[in-house]
Image (spheres, grey):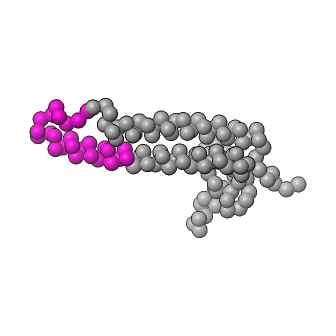
């Protein structure tokens, strides 16, 4: 008897729930980061003395740049998770794109948007 060609519908539903939970949490963090970029909390340097204003503006700029990078990473993460949902719908989820074998459940639970098994992920040719 050969290897299981794909995960069962019940297994795919388990992964769907994991992914939906991760999308919800990632979206909440993304929204927080975007709010901080818009400076919606109203904090700025208007109420500080001129001596510290330049230092605070520099720190604020660095923080905004860091938040922008984090927001972009979250956006990409959400995009990868949504692509995983499409693979679930297509019943191709959990199949290594390099070997065609099933990616172990443990890996998918840890990295639900994975498209490569660990061996292929660690392969320097990928």
**Residue 87 vertical position relative to residue 25 in the rendered view, above or below:** below
Res 119 visible: no
Q: Nearer the viewer, residue 98 or 118?
A: 98
| Image spot of residue 107 (x, y percent) | 64, 48
Q: Which residue is at 59% across, 68% downward?
A: 125
Residue 53 on the magenta segment: yes
For this orientation, the residue located farthest to the bottom is: 125
Q: Quadrant of the C terminus?
A: bottom right
| Image spot of residue 82 (x, y percent) | 59, 45
Q: Which residue is at 79% across, 53% downward?
A: 5
**Lateral position of residue 49 relative to residue 92, left or right:** left
**Residue 124 vertical position relative to residue 62 in the rendered view, above or below:** below
For this orientation, the residue located farthest to the left is: 50
Q: Nearer the viewer, residue 31 or 51?
A: 31
Prevalent SS, magenta region: helix
Q: Residue 56: which quarter of the image?
A: top left
Q: Which residue is at 22% across, 46% downward?
A: 58
Q: Quadrant of the N terminus?
A: bottom right
In this figure, what is the number of numbered marks?
Answer: 0
For this orientation, the residue located farthest to the right is: 1
Q: Residue 59: which quarter of the image?
A: top left
Give the residues in magenta.
43-68
Q: Which residue is at 70% across, 45% downward?
A: 89
| Image spot of residue 41 (x, y percent) | 31, 31
């Amino acid at each position: 008897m050969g290897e299981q060609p794909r995960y069962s519908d019940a297994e795919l539903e388990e992964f769907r729930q994991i992914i939906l939970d991760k999308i919800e949490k990632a979206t909440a963090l993304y929204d927080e980061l975007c709010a901080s970029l818009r400076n919606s909390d109203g904090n700025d340097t208007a109420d500080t003395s001129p001596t510290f204003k330049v230092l605070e503006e520099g720190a604020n700029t660095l923080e905004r740049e860091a938040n922008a990078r984090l927001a972009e990473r979250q956006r990409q993460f959400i995009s990868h998770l949504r692509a995983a949902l499409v693979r679930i719908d297509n019943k191709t989820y959990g199949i290594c794109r390099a070997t065609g074998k099933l990616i172990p459940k443990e890996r998918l639970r840890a990295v639900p948007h994975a498209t490569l098994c660990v061996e292929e992920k660690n392969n320097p040719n990928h």
